[in-house]
Structures are given as structure tokens and as C-alpha cells.
Amino acid sequence: MKEALNKFKSLKLVRMMGFNRVVLIGVIILMYILFTILSPILHQGTNFAQVSRLLSALNYGYFIGFLALGVTFVIATGNIDFSIGPVMFCSALISGYCMKQYAFPLWLCLIMCVLIGAVFGTVGGAFVAYLHLPSFITSMALMQVAKGLGSVFTKTQTVSWPQGDAPNTWFRNFVRYKGIPTGLIFLIVVAIICAIVLNHTRAGRYIICLGANKEAVRLSGVDTRRWEMLAFIICGALAGFAAIFYVGAYTTVQPGMGDTFNNEAIAACVMGGTSMAGGLASILGTVIGAFIVALMQEGILAMGFSISYQYALTGLIVLGAVIADTLSRRRSN
């Protein structure tokens, strides 16, 4: 058994992708098979293999994927950001309200989504990098600010972006165009850019090194504050980008929401091989993890269970991934 496993690990494709990522792809395939078999048994009349189910899972995976890509940069530095979900909702609420109430053009509202997210990332990064506040407390505080700001700005009203045959619905083509899941193309392109930044630029190397040994980086003459703050700005901007794909898929945004998406994005990130201790990150693993979360959400609903089961499973996945990462680090040490 051990010899067969070693031979499998030595395959060129496995070495190129990484054994952990190949395992995650296997998990996706296994989940799909299980949900296809179990859904008609547990929830009569349901067929998980329908194309509509896969497209629904993809819709969920897009914005979770963008959130997860952003928080990968922050976790790589050894920090955490629990504000990304509410920041995504705050961006969508404020931008959508401006379009609805003040007749802002759609293109400007889409840019506003990214800018609002980037502002939150800048503020959080400044507090952590320059004022040396704990990222856990800072992000929890900004999470409440984002929820409150979105509610106050919209007067606690639900905001609906254009849908159906209404004018200005072209932004929904970002998610799906004539049945083609264009959102997958955008996610892959952004993931490639993130991988290049993280693995092949000076900024990315410093971000990874900050998580591995921040003090050593500082003593080598690098301004660690700039690169630590950059990680939060990227995270915030991608949360705003996720807002565009959320409204493109679901159109309606409610104030005071978004908390649960934090855990799902972090779960995708940690499942993909990014260490919660920092210093190790995988963009490809994060994308695969995001689709595992999305497939799990769609599969649980297809089997007739409530979304609460997904929350429990997500928590267990995060706990298991952290335990595995901790044990791995102990063995390597």
C-alpha cells in the first residue's frame, strides 16, 4: 500500500499539482458521486446530476472563491480577517442603493463595490500593520462596522440589483452568458493573477515571509508594514469584487448579513493548504477548496437538509484542517 502511494506521488502530474491538491480534486469527485446517489434516496424526486444543480453550485463558488483568494493573502502573513463577508454585503448594499436612489450609472456602482472593499482593507491593514493591533480584534470590529454601515446607509432596506428584463442587467453576464458559466473564467483569471503575485513577485515573497518569520524580515531591512497592509488591501478589494458576482447571481442583498461567508472562505483557504500559522499558501488549493464548499452546500440542500448542516460541516472541516496543519508543522520541526 505504501509503495503504491509513493508511486502515485511520484507521477509527473501529481508532483506538478501537488499531492494535497490531487486529493482535494478526488474529494470533489467523490462528493459529486455520493450526492448523485444519495439525493434521490433522501429527498425523493431530486436529481443532483442536473445541470441546473451544477450551475447553482458554481454561482455559489464564484463569490466564495473571490473571498477565499483575498483572505489567502492575509492568512499567509499570519493574520486573519473575519470582516470579508459583511464587507462584501456592505459594498453591494451601498453601491446598489446609490444606483437605485441616486441614479448612479451601473459601471460606477461596480467600481464602487471594489473601492469600498479596498477602503475596508486599507483601514484594517493600517490598524494591524502600523498600530500593531491584533488582526482578530480588528477584523471583528470592522465586521460590525460593515454590517452597521450597510444597514444605516440603506435605512435597513433590502437592495435589489437589476434583474430579468430590466435595463442595466449586463453585469449578470459576468456570472453566466447564454448558459455559459463565464464566472468560472473570471475566477480562473483572477486566481492566475493572484498566483503570479504571490509566487513570482517581490510583494508575494514578502507576504509569505512575513508569515514564516516576520521579525527576520524586519531585521533584514524590509518595511514589513507596507507589505502586511498590502495583503489586507488585496483582501478587501477581492471582497468588493466578490460582491459583483454575488449580486450577479442572486441580485438581492439584505443588510446585516454576510457573517457565515467568512467561515466558508476561510475553510476553503485552509482546506487548500494555506497554513493558519502563516508562511504557506496555495492559490490553486484555495480555488479547489471553494468549489468543495460550494458543492457541499448544494449537495446538502439537494438531500433535503437545512443549511445548518453546512455550518456544522464547515466548522468541522476548518477544525480538521487546522489540526492537520498543526501536526504537519510539528513533524517538520
Image: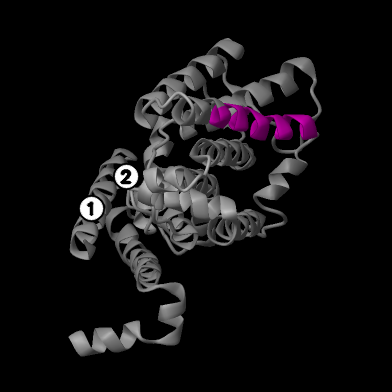
Q: Is mark 1 on a helix, strand or loop?
A: helix
Q: Can residue 56 be seen in this view?
A: no
Per the rendering, the mark at residue 120 is none
In-front residue for pair 231/71? 231
Residue in the image at 64% along x and 41% along y: 248
The percent coordinates of residue 241 (x first, y second) are 62, 40
Tell me where the magenta segment starts and ends, as one range.
Answer: 106-122
Above or below 143: residue 199: below
Left or right: 236, with 95 as reference point: left
Q: Name the residue under label 1.
A: 320
The number of numbered badges drawn on the structure is 2
The percent coordinates of residue 236 (x first, y second) are 56, 35
Residue in the image at 58% along x and 54% along y: 202
Residue in the image at 42% along x and 60% along y: 48
Q: Is residue 183 visible?
A: yes
Closer to the camera: disc 1 or disc 2? 1
Question: Overall secondary structure of the magenta stretch?
Answer: helix
Q: What residue type is labelled 2?
A: Gln
Q: Does the magenta stretch include residue 70?
A: no
Q: Which amino acid does label 1 sit on?
A: Gly
In-front residue for pair 324/302? 324
Crowd rating for badge 2 (residues with CA inside 10 Å; few <14, some 14–19, many 20+): many
The percent coordinates of residue 130 (x first, y second) are 49, 27
In-front residue for pair 231/24? 231
